[in-house]
Amino acid sequence: MALDEAALALAAEGVHLLRLYQWSTETVSFGANEAAARHWDRDRLARDGIHCVRRPTGGRAVWHAADDLTYAWTGPVAALGGVHSAYAELHRRLAHALDSALSLAPTLAPKPARLPGLAPGACFDVPVGGEVMIHARKVIGSAQLVRHGMLLQHGAIARSDRTASLGRYRTAPVDLSVARHSSLPAADRLGAAIAAAWLGAGATPAPPELTSRLETASLQSLPRYRDTAWTWRR
């Protein structure tokens, strides 16, 4: 999360950056304004050794499995036509990558009649419109942060349905009877397909000096994301 936030700061210099990464262990990320302390069982998460972090972006809780993939895009929001256009455009690009390289036949979710907002639940429970779907399962859900005209959009690429994994930690019971079993290729294949699509559209690999700057800048916000008071602040 600190690296994603550091990339957002670099966007002010006109840098458009796509970052692909995996989590080292099973982790739950909460949205910036989510009432995590009210809706998720902190004690049980701790007992089971599940790490938690609060994102700088909005939305609801996401289960990040160690074999899933996460993407983060940062750049001037105007470059993609605004917040809503960026959400749709980045999902279109990701869907195209999964289709052209892996023939996964993804679709984009239609907008539902009623949005879930920050009601109790998980990000992958219900599409809000524009997310990437495969076999009726939401496989890419994203969240955004705009700061001084710069956009951070990042999201999980869930190789399998993580509803049950996250659902057992809710403070209120939830019906987990509906299971969606479709599985995506390994994370390295997903990452290679997405990277190839970006490079094919004219992107270039980040030079080592940019990566070094990003890592150094991330140290400023790293303590906040490691602080349980921030993670469980509400």
Image (cartoon, rainbow, N blue to C red):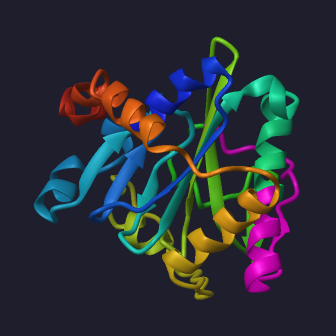
In this view of the protein, which residue sits in the foreground, 9 or 151? 9
- Between 218 and 25, the one nearer to me in the picture: 218
Q: In the rendered view of the protein, which quadrant contains the C terminus?
A: top left
Whether residue 167 is situated above or below residue 215 in the rendered picture? below
Residue 94 among those drawn in magenta: yes
Q: Is residue 99 visible?
A: yes
Viewer-proximal residue, 172 or 188? 188
Q: Which x, y percent locates residue 150?
A: 66, 22
As displayed, is residue 29 above or below residue 217? below
12 left or right of 104 in image: left
Q: Is residue 219 above or below residue 98?
A: above
Q: Give percent across and percent down for residue 204.
A: 67, 50
> Which residues fall within the magenta stretch?
93-117
Q: Quadrant of the N terminus?
A: top left
Q: Residue at x 77, y 42 (%)?
A: 87
42 horizontally vs 68: left or right: left
In the image, 109: left or right of 26? right
Residue sitting at 40 percent across and 64 percent down? 166
Residue in the picture at 43% in, 36% down: 209
Q: Please tell me which residue is depicted at 39% across the width and 68% down the height of the picture.
A: 65
